C-alpha cells in the first residue's frame, strides 16, 4: 500500500480526497493543512506522493513543489483558473471539481512516476535564488506581498512563454538596470 500526503487548506477537502483514495485499498493517506507540515512529513517519513490544492495556509503549492526533494511528485487539484497560474512544469494538474475515477487515475500515474521513473526536473538552486531575488525586488519596490510578487512572475512567464527563472531575470534587469546578470 502506498502512502500519500493529502494537503489542502480546508479539512473537508482533505477528508473527501483521503476517503476516495483509501476506499480503493491501494493508498493510505496522511493529511496536512500547511506547507510546513508537508515538508516535515516528507522529510520524516520519506514519502514521495503529494496531492494538494493551489495554496496552503502558509505558501502556494507551487512554491512547496520546488522545496520538496527531487523524488517527490505532486498532483494539484484546483479550479482550472488557478491551475493556469501554476507554471511548474513538473506538477501534474487536475481541474476541480474532480470525479473519483479521474482522481484515482491521476494518483496511480503519480505513483508510477515515483517508482524509478524519471521525476520532472526542478529549478536549480541558482534559478530558485533568482526567482527569490525578483520577488524580493518586486515586494520592495512595489509594496507587493510575497504571493502577489510570485503571481506577477507567473503571469509574466505565461504571457511571454518563458520559464519562471527567465521572467525573474527580466524583472530584475528592469528594476535594477546595469546589474550583473
Image: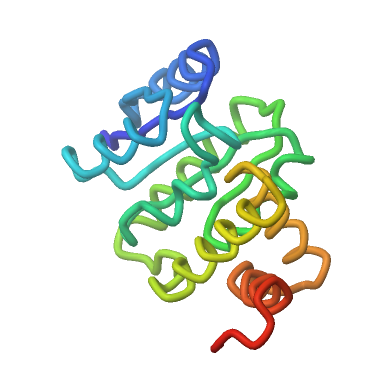
Spot occupied by residue 134 in the image (x, y as percentages of width and height): 59, 64
Question: What is the quadrant of the C terminus in the image?
Answer: bottom right
Spot occupied by residue 45 in the image (x, y as percentages of width and height): 18, 38
Relative to 60, residue 175 above or below: below
Give the left or right position of residue 109, taking residue 100 as reference.
left
47 and 171: which one is in front?
Answer: 171
- Residue 122 appears anywhere in the view: no
Give the left or right position of residue 115, taking residue 181 as reference.
left
Give the left or right position of residue 177, taking residue 111 as reference.
right
11 and 4: which one is in front?
Answer: 11
Instruction: Single out the residue that lies furthest toward the top.
Output: 12
Residue 169 image-quadrant placement: bottom right
What residue is shown at x 42% (from left), y 73% (from top)?
A: 124
What residue is shown at x 70% (from left), y 37% (from top)?
A: 95
Instruction: Single out the residue that lies furthest toward the right.
Output: 159
22 and 153: which one is in front?
Answer: 153
Amino acid at each position: 500500500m502506498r502512502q500519500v500526503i493529502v494537503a489542502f487548506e480546508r479539512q473537508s477537502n482533505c477528508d473527501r480526497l483521503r476517503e476516495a483514495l483509501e476506499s480503493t485499498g491501494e493508498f493510505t493517506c496522511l493529511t496536512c493543512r500547511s506547507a510546513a507540515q508537508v515538508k516535515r512529513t516528507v522529510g520524516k517519513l520519506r514519502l514521495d506522493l503529494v496531492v494538494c490544492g493551489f495554496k496552503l495556509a502558509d505558501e502556494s503549492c507551487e512554491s512547496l513543489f520546488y522545496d520538496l526533494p527531487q523524488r517527490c511528485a505532486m498532483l494539484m487539484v484546483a479550479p482550472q483558473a488557478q491551475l493556469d497560474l501554476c507554471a511548474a512544469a513538473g506538477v501534474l494538474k487536475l481541474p476541480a471539481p474532480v470525479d473519483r475515477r479521474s482522481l484515482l487515475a491521476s494518483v496511480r500515474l503519480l505513483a508510477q512516476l515515483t517508482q524509478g521513473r524519471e521525476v520532472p526536473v526542478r529549478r536549480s538552486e541558482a534559478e530558485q535564488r533568482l526567482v527569490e531575488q525578483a520577488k524580493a525586488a518586486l515586494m520592495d519596490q512595489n509594496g507587493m506581498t510575497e504571493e502577489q510578487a510570485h503571481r506577477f512572475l507567473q503571469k509574466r512567464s505565461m504571457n511571454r512563454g518563458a520559464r519562471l527563472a527567465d521572467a525573474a531575470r527580466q524583472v530584475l534587469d528592469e528594476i535594477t538596470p546595469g546589474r550583473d546578470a
